[in-house]
């Protein structure tokens, strides 16, 4: 049996449509899922939508629809967007599915049976944007830091999960398993939240039905529905087959949650303590990324400064946008998005560096080798250096992607592109081709470039799958991805056989120009 690799994105609220932030999380997960599939692992990649809660109810009211009709419509649009962007998730999870609701009730009942839930009166400041009560740390000048809105004072009798009883266990667990929550700054942040208390007390896990009916009924009190976060987090377990499917534990043990830093608290604190209270094991880990900003403000539905991935695709094709997101953001840190920066980067890296290497290699192969991979003559140090660059790139891509560092993986891959370009520049096969005595040298040069392009295409496949497929087709090995095992096959230097037909064609990445908003 091959090794399981299980990866989840957050399930997104359906009070709006996907923007750059959601697209980034899902594209990072897609890149990793594709890489691990190419590494021969047994991948399960889940994304989806979070359909209950006040925000969604309010959005349905504003649209004049029932919550169910509203969420059916919007969830369909999320699904259609990911399909249009060719994302490779194995399951699109919806919290309104019967399976999800049943699992949430099993979880609530387990925590209740364990004596971990209590009925109490509570007063606090609630942010509907965050769908939770805020603490001082979450606010600045009386406003929610994320949503820049004043939270509402609320007083209500509700059910509380005795979360604080699990804090010392959680702190110990995080200390003893430094790899569980990464990058380290976020682990430290959670430890600081626990240590300082920072208003983190017990967790209100219910909403009275008379105020909010749109949710999963609590199994032990039908006058209440489940708090949306208690409902949403369970999706990860349900997706692994919990509670009924045999073998769910194997998947769960290998499951990593990819999230944005805005939802660190629910994932770093609510979720592990809920699992602990229910007597369930923790998943493998949590990986946290930073935020995309525009003019220093977080991109968000409530602030209205959105970048629509479908508009990007229509204007420029999806590859440049996907490349920019994966290359520009250092995993864990914030980044700024600007269309002109995206165009500048992709013109330099994709159109110039990679696109040029590809088109000049295939043009010369057509011209000097009857459009087939040539038979090489003897090779020397220069060829050995390109070959070494490919081996280094394969190793580095593997290492960095396993650490979620897509930016470093792409940097390493483009070192190979640069090495190959330097090699052709130095060898000048277009000049050598004029001299019949140097015919063998031309063959060696073009052979080396073709092998390098094969390695580049294989390693590029998780990042830019469409471009990789085009490259492999034109290199005459359209099915190469079906049998490849990375990183080892990225290092092979003899897989592209002399005589394989190659095809020159349109530019792989046309140069882009900024398209202004109409
Ligand atoms: O929080 N930059 O859903 P949500 C980067 N339903 N990533 C961003 C981003 C930005 N500016 N804005 C959003 C929820 N994201 C809950 C999750 S999970 C059990 C429940 C991404 O629609 C990032 O992954 O508000 C963030 O964590 C997520 O979208 C929040 O999506």
Image (cartoon, rainbow, N blue to C red):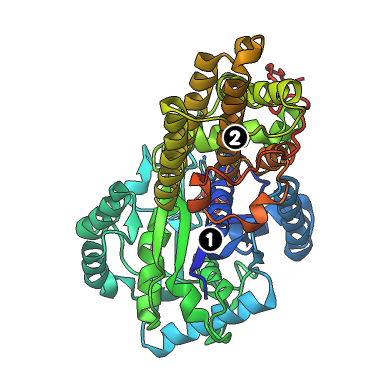
Side (left or right) of 316 relative to 258: right
Residue at left offset 66%, top offset 9%: 434
Q: Earlier in the sequence, mark 1 or mark 2?
A: 1
Q: CA distance from mark 1 to mark 2?
A: 32 Å
Which numbered tag is attached to residue 276?
Answer: none
Residue at left offset 70%, top offset 50%: 82
Image height of 309 relative to 403, above or below = above
- Residue at mark 1: 8
Does the residue tagged 1 have its C-beta within 8 Å of any atom of ligand 1?
A: no
Nearest to viewer (mark 1 / mark 2):
2
Q: Is residue 91 visible?
A: yes
Image height of 329 relative to 9, above or below = above
Q: Nearer the viewer, residue 429 or 416?
A: 429
> Residue 89: x percent and y percent?
64, 58
Q: Nearer the viewer, residue 297 or 290?
A: 290
Image height of 158 relative to 456, above or below = below
> Residue 335: x percent and y percent?
45, 32
Indicate the secondary structure of the residue bearing disc 1: strand
> Residue 477: x percent and y percent?
70, 45
Quadrant where the C terminus lies? top right
Q: Quadrant of residue 58?
A: bottom right
Residue at left offset 25%, top offset 52%: 188
Which numbered tag is attached to residue 453?
Answer: 2
Residue at left offset 41%, top offset 68%: 271
Looking at the image, how many numbered discs can be counted on the residues? 2
Please tell me how crowded label 1 is: few (under 14), some (14-19), or many (20+) other residues with Cα within 10 Å. many
The residue furthest bottom is: 113
Side (left or right) of 190 relative to 211: left
Q: Quadrant of residue 282?
A: bottom left
């Amino acid at each position: 049996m091959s090794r399981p690799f299980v990866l989840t994105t957050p399930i997104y609220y359906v009070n709006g449509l996907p923007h750059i932030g959601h697209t980034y999380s899902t594209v990072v997960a897609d890149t990793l899922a594709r890489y691990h599939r190419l590494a021969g692992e047994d991948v399960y990649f889940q994304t989806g939508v979070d359909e209950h809660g006040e925000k969604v109810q309010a959005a349905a009211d504003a649209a004049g629809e029932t919550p169910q009709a509203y969420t059916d419509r919007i969830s369909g649009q999320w699904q259609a967007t990911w399909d249009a962007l060719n994302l490779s998730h194995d399951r699109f999870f919806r919290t309104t599915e019967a399976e999800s609701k049943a699992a949430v009730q099993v979880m609530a009942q387990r925590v209740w049976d364990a004596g971990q839930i209590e009925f109490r009166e509570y007063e606090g400041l609630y942010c509907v944007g965050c769908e939770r009560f805020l603490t001082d740390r979450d606010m600045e000048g009386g406003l929610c830091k994320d949503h820049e809105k004043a939270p509402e004072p609320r007083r209500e009798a509700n059910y509380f999960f005795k979360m604080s009883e699990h804090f010392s266990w959680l702190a110990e667990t995080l200390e003893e398993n430094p790899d569980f929550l990464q990058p380290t700054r976020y682990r430290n942040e959670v430890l600081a939240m626990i240590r300082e208390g920072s208003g983190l007390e017990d967790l209100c896990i219910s909403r009275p039905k008379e105020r909010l009916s749109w949710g999963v009924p609590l199994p032990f009190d039908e006058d209440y529905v489940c708090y949306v976060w208690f409902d949403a987090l369970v999706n990860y377990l349900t997706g692994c087959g919990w509670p009924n499917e045999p073998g769910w534990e194997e998947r769960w043990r290998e499951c990593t949650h990819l999230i944005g830093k805005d939802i660190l608290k629910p994932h770093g604190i609510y979720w592990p303590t809920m699992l602990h209270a229910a007597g369930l094991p923790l998943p493998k880990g949590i990986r946290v990324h930073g935020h995309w900003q525009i003019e220093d403000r977080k991109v968000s539905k409530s602030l209205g400064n959105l970048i629509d991935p479908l508009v990007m695709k229509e204007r420029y094709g999806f590859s440049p946008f996907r490349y920019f997101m994966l290359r520009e953001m250092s995993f864990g840190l914030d980044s700024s998005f600007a269309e002109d920066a995206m165009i500048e980067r992709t013109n330099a890296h994709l159109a110039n560096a990679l696109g040029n290497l590809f088109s000049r290699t295939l043009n010369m192969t057509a011209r000097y080798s009857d459009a087939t991979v040539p038979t090489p003559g003897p090779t020397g140090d220069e060829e050995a250096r390109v070959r070494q660059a490919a081996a280094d790139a394969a190793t580095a891509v593997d290492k960095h992607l396993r650490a979620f560092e897509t930016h470093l993986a792409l940097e390493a891959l483009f070192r190979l592109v640069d090495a190959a370009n330097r090699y052709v520049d130095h060898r000048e096969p277009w000049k050598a081709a004029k001299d019949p005595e140097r015919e063998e040298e031309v063959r060696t040069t073009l052979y080396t470039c073709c092998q390098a392009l094969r390695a580049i295409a294989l390693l590029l496949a998780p990042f830019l799958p469409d471009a990789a497929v085009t490259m492999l087709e034109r290199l005459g090995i359209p099915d190469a991805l079906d049998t490849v095992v990375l990183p080892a096959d990225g290092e092979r230097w003899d897989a592209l056989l002399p005589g394989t037909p190659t095809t020159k064609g349109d530019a792989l990445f046309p140069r882009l120009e900024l398209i202004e908003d109409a």
